[in-house]
């Protein structure tokens, strides 16, 4: 069992930066691919970024590529999402996820319905 708790969300202006954190407890998160997903009002939850168990491989949605960076510190059982150049369309609840799936090379295709563990989410609001 893994418990995930996100933090770091808030209200910022377009162009600002935020860093989200996801602290794991229970079983170590190093056993999982870790990812960030987001859900805007009236929209389905979507993939944002993922990182392999070792941290050596990452994958991003096209909409955030070049602006967001995912990282992990397995010693601290924590995953991060650094978000730069934020846009109003980045406004959403951001969820941390632990997935027992594997990267295929540098490719990761998450199945939201098969994610093992979810955090409770943290709100990110970007004003224009």
Image (spheres, helix red, strand yellow):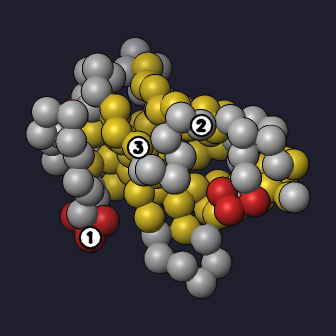
Distance Cα–Cα, label 1 vs label 3: 19 Å
Mark 2 lies on residue: 67
Mark 1 lies on residue: 113
In-front residue for pair 41/68: 68
Distance Cα–Cα, label 3 vs label 2: 10 Å
In-front residue for pair 57/3: 57
Q: Please tell me which residue is depicted at 33% across the width and 47% down the height of the picture.
A: 98
Q: Which quarter of the figure is the C terminus placed in?
A: bottom right
Counting residues from the start of the chain, the first of labels 3 and 2 encountered is 3
Looking at the picture, how far across and down is residue 90, in whole percent?
Answer: 66, 57
Give the class, few, some or many, for how many residues have Cα within 10 Å of label 2's Cα (few <14, many ≥20): few
Q: Please tell me which residue is depicted at 41% across the width and 57% down the height of the picture.
A: 47
Counting residues from the start of the chain, the first of labels 2 and 1 encountered is 2
Looking at the picture, how far across and down is residue 23, in whole percent?
Answer: 51, 36
Please tell me whether mark 1 sits on a helix, a strand or a loop: helix
Q: Is residue 34 above or below residue 63?
A: above
Mark 3 lies on residue: 60
Please tell me whether mark 3 sits on a helix, a strand or a loop: strand
> Which mark's residue is nearer the viewer, 1 or 3?
3
Give the class, few, some or many, for how many residues have Cα within 10 Å of label 3's Cα (few <14, many ≥20): many
Total count of labels: 3
Looking at the picture, how far across and down is residue 92, in whole percent?
Answer: 64, 63
């Amino acid at each position: 069992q893994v418990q995930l708790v996100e933090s770091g969300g808030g209200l910022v202006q377009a162009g600002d930066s935020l860093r989200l954190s996801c602290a794991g407890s229970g079983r170590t998160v190093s056993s999982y691919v870790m990812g960030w997903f987001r859900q805007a009002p009236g929209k389905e939850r979507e993939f944002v970024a993922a990182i392999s168990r070792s941290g050596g491989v990452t994958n991003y949605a096209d909409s955030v590529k070049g602006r967001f960076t995912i990282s992990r510190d397995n010693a601290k059982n924590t995953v991060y999402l650094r978000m730069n150049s934020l846009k109003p369309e980045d406004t959403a609840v951001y969820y941390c996820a632990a997935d027992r799936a594997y990267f295929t090379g540098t490719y990761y295709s998450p199945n939201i319905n098969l994610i093992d563990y979810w955090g409770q989410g943290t709100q990110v609001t970007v004003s224009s």
